[in-house]
Image (cartoon, coloured by chain):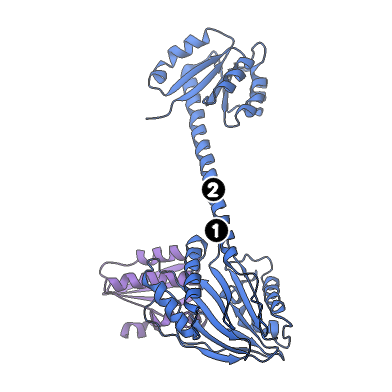
Chain colours: A blue, B purple
Amino acid sequence: MTDTYKILVVDDEPDLEPLILQRMRRQIRSNEYEFVFARDGLDALEKLNADSTIDMVLSDINMPKMDGLTLLQQLPDVDPNLRAVIVSAYGDMDNIRTAMNRGAFDFVTKPIDFDDLKITISRTLEHLAEWREALSSRDQLVALQNELSIASQLQQSILPNIPPVTEGCEVSANMEPARNVGGDFYDYFKLDNHVGLVVADVSDKGIPASMFMMSSRTALKGAAIGVREPKMVLTEVNNQLQQDNPTFMFVTLIYALFDPDTGLLTYSIAGHDPPLLVSASGTVTELPLTKGIAVGIAADVVYTQESVTLNPGDTVVLYTDGVTEAMNADNQQFGMGRLAEVFEGNPPESATAANEAVFEYVRNFAGDAPQSDDITCLSLRRP
Amino acid sequence: MEFSHDRSGDTLVVNASGRVDGSNASDFLESLQGMFDPGDQRIILDLGGLEYISSAGLRVLLMAAQNLDKQNKSFSICSLTEAVGDVFRISGFDQIINVFPSVEDAKQG
């Protein structure tokens, strides 16, 4: 069953109406077309305003009250998606040109050749159908983009932005997604007199990654409560996430627990880049990796942990590969070397300064090159 | 991404080169799986020409590996460059997927 197209025929010549009804009787009977008639431009506008189901207008040029060329100018105000075909005298190129300039889709000449008119009408309506389809895809795209931006806001809203106020501990963290919705996240939370810190990178980006990210974050925070051993936390998170994971998503992450009283930082790494230690004097070292793999891909993974004591003025920088793998226009990677150079001989004065320095260096390095991965960095400093 | 492959008996060796990231990871998987024949029992992926692989790329390798595992077929990768080798080592994927220094080693393994 196809929809019937409604065509408004505008002509002051009363003979045209029976002629069209007679020559188009097959299309009318099969419900392909339906015709309505008007005698001049004003009459046509009234009918268009009264009936929004009219799809196209077939109009003569010379008519009393309002001519066809004036009517053409008014059509977009009635409905910008209306299509018009003009009927003009044979060889009247001036009027035809004016009509086309005013947005007529096509024209036919008098005396009307009905075979030609049928082809012209069907071409016009085909065009209209394609146009409407394009409009509807565009609307769907806009709706999808709206949902994406909501997802992006949701994601940013679960990232904490007020670091825990704890004496002996400064934290600063930022995440800059490459697309609307990223796969990176960070987290920090107070656990009794300790502070838990997380930096994570979910495989891939976009909505699926962000959903996996949300469940990872919840699982981790839940597992961290009351547990003092980061390796036990990762074991628990891995067991939860790998149980039912048909999409083969995984997340690499570092979970660290900091004791502000003693400066002891204990961390466990699940397939993630090692943290960087910047001493108060500005020497930079990579902290050792621990045993264990990305979370979510295999059962019964054994995670180990390492500890380091931060002296006053020491900073630990956790980051995702969006930092080290940031590219410049020459296809070079930022790399570990440049990340170390940010702080070499230049110890940060605060956690915020450390984080700002990383983002500034990466931004300057990348220049105009497009950002291909989320960039996340979390700095912890013992004041 | 560029591919070539070489089959001898029930062993298929696929050479992949270029970069795999979020933008082409699903094409990568599709092209790779498109090369498999039902008769292939052992699939070796030679990544000697691979410059870069992102986590999205690792994920599709994992999907391919698990699919082949379900069919009792062997899957291994070999000839990793230093940069790609680091990605496998740090993420722990070298403990999930068989990694060999060369195609010859993979055939022996």
Dividing the image into 4 quarters, which one contains the N terminus of chain A? top left
Chain of residue at mark 2: A
Q: Amino acid at mark 1?
A: Ala
Residue drawn at x 47%, y 9% as measured from the top left? A18
Which image quadrant is residue A175 in?
bottom right
**Residue located beneath label 1 in the image:** A151
Residue drawn at x 65%, y 28% as measured from the top left? A77
Q: Is residue A259 above or below residue A124?
A: below
Where residue B60 appears, as percent x and y from the top left, is 42, 69
Where residue B41 appears, as percent x and y from the top left, is 27, 74
> Mark 2 to mark 1: distance in Å?
12 Å
Tell me if B14 is positioned left or right of A166 in this view: left
Find the residue positioned furthest to the front: A192
Which image quadrant is residue B37 in?
bottom left
Q: Amino acid at mark 2?
A: Ala
Where residue A323 appears, as percent x and y from the top left, is 61, 75
For mark 2, does the 10 Å Cα neighbourhood hold few (<14), some (14 to 19), or many (20 or more) residues? few
Tell me if A204 is positioned left or right of A316 in this view: left
The local secondary structure at tag 2 comes to: helix
Tell me if A357 is positioned left or right of A309 in this view: right
Tell me if I can see residue A351 in this picture.
yes
**Residue located beneath label 2 in the image:** A143
Q: Is residue A235 above or below residue B63?
A: below
Observer-nearest of A221 and A296: A221
Where residue A289 appears, as percent x and y from the top left, is 52, 87
Chain of residue at mark 1: A
Residue drawn at x 43%, y 12% as measured from the top left? A22
For mark 1, does the 10 Å Cα neighbourhood hold few (<14), some (14 to 19), or many (20 or more) residues? some
Q: Earlier in the sequence, mark 2 or mark 1?
A: 2
